[in-house]
Image (cartoon, rainbow, N blue to C red):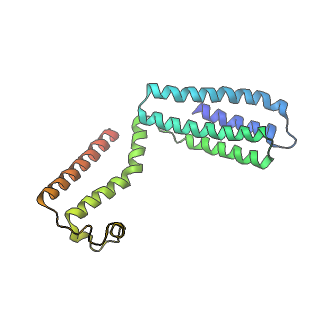
Amino acid sequence: MSIISLIYSYSTRLWVALGKQPPTPSAAVPTLQEITNHIKSLYGCALVFRELEGNTIAAEVNTVATEVLLAMQVLLESYSVRKSGEDSMRNTASLHEACERARNLSVDNREAALKIWKQDSDGLKDAIKELNSLLNPQSTENEVSDGWDELLGEDAGQAELSEDDISAIKKVRTNILSCIKNALSWLAA
């Protein structure tokens, strides 16, 4: 995180040197050298995460590092074509926002995985609801339409299920609930 803080700080210094009028390129040279060093460090740290930590945290670090590096690229390009001071200020702010998002980086692989579970839990809840509605079609008659009738036809969900179908649906539901329970207990430990 200290690398991100340094990138944030030096990007502000760079804007003071080049973004304000009149620009002072001589003041920007040491700042650009520091930014170059910190970008190299950020890239190196992101690569190390792949080797030392779990896949989920490594993917999160990669995403955050990529956002910061792309924002830095846009900022540096805005100085190279000498756009208006507003462009460089806006691009500096975009880089700052990417750095702020990086501060919410997970502490470890477990926390990163828990974030993913929380983001994806709505889809799992919907899947369980759909399975329950297949088992209890009368309980879903008063619900708002989910749009499938329009695509599949009015009679699509009204066919009687065989005992084998019901048994298979119950097994799938039990397996999904068991997987969720096991994953959440692992993540909470």
Where does the C terminus fall, quadrant-wise? top left
Question: Observer-nearest residue: 102 or 75?
Answer: 75
Residue 27 position, x and y percent, is 82, 31
Relative to 58, say whether 159 is above or below: below
Q: Quadrant of residue 78?
A: top right
Q: Residue furthest left?
A: 163
Relative to 157, say whether 54 is above or below: above
Residue in the image at 46% along x and 28% along y: 50
Residue in the image at 39% along x and 37% along y: 110
Q: Residue furthest right?
A: 22
* Left or right of residue 154, residue 12 in this image: right
Residue 143 position, x and y percent, is 31, 71
Residue 111 position, x and y percent, is 42, 39
* Left or right of residue 188, residue 136 in this image: left
* Left or right of residue 184, residue 45 in this image: right
Q: Is residue 47 visible?
A: yes
Residue in the image at 61% along x and 31% along y: 3
Q: Is residue 107 visible?
A: no
Residue 129 position, x and y percent, is 29, 60
Looking at the image, how many numbered discs can be counted on the residues? 0
Relative to 89, say whether 3 is above or below: above
Question: Observer-nearest residue: 156 or 99?
Answer: 156
Q: Quadrant of residue 182?
A: top left
Question: Observer-nearest residue: 103 or 49?
Answer: 49
* Left or right of residue 55, residue 101 in this image: right
